Amino acid sequence: MNNLRRQLLYSHLLLIGLMLLLLAGAVARFFHLGRSIDRVLDANVKSVLLMQRAKDELGELERLGGKDPETVRAVSDAIDAELGNLTELGERELAEQLRDDFAAYQQGKRSHQEVTDRAQAILELNLSAIRQADARAKAEARQSAILGIGITAFASLLALWLVRRTIREALLPLVSLARQAQEIGAGRLNQRIIVH
């Protein structure tokens, strides 16, 4: 009986360990995905919004003849904020070129379209990074789901095997007792029934 209790205890502890491992893996993956999403929201989306604002203000500045100090300040502020929010390879160079192009635009040496195109390039660089981060997050989510299903299937098969083995070992003395009782019932009285 002690052997059966020990087997039940070990099999249950093993299954609980597998379930905890599965849960810990899922929680770790969720935290990792959360950090990835936060990074995209904090950096790339901010750059996209800054460049969209710069483009909008550039359009307004062009409409006003390039001389509105408030709009000039709004464009400069967006460019400065972008220079402080660099996350992608090549973004620094683009942002510095945008700053220089805007200064040249104010002196009449660059066209509105050239400055707007530079802001659009930064916007598209960050949109591309957002799309790539989205694809990575989806791939990680798929991988986590497949891993979770695999571990769950393994734990289920292990549980079935442990249950079958435990039941067989629990019933073995009863099967032996039934066989010995049949022997005695058949007239073979020299049988001994041993009870553990």
Image (tube, helix red, strand yellow):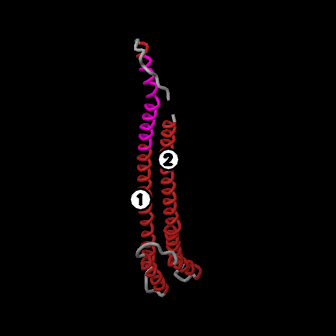
Name the residue tied to disc 1: 135
Nearest to the observer: residue 144 or residue 23: 23
Q: Within the magenta stretch, is there residue 156?
A: yes
Q: Which mark is residue 48?
A: none
Mark 2 or mark 1: which comes first in sequence? 2
The amino acid type found where label 2 is placed reads Met
Disc 1 on helix, strand or loop? helix
Above or below — where is 157 with respect to 137? above
Above or below — where is 63 with respect to 147? below
**Extreme residue toward the bottom, this view:** 107
**Main SS of the magenta segment?**
helix
Q: CA distance from mark 2 to mark 1?
A: 29 Å
Q: Is residue 188 visible?
A: yes
Disc 2 on helix, strand or loop? helix
Q: Position of residue 157 (x, y in %)?
A: 41, 40
User: Which residue shows up at 43% across the image and 24% down it?
Assistant: 176
The residue stretch that appears in magenta = 154-182
How many residues crowd mark 1 within 10 Å: few (<14), some (14–19), many (20+)?
A: few
User: Which residue shows up at 53% across the image and 67% down it?
Assistant: 42
**Number of numbered discs:** 2
Q: Position of residue 102 (x, y in %)?
A: 48, 82
**Extreme residue toward the front, this view:** 190
Nearest to the observer: residue 17 or residue 7: 7
Q: Within the magenta stretch, is there residue 31?
A: no
Q: Position of residue 56 (x, y in %)?
A: 52, 72
Q: Is residue 63 visible?
A: no
**Extreme residue toward the top, this view:** 187
How many residues crowd mark 2 within 10 Å: few (<14), some (14–19), many (20+)?
A: some
Does the residue at mark 2 contact the one at mark 1 (Cβ under 8 Å)? no
The amino acid type found where label 1 is placed reads Ala
Name the residue tied to disc 2: 19
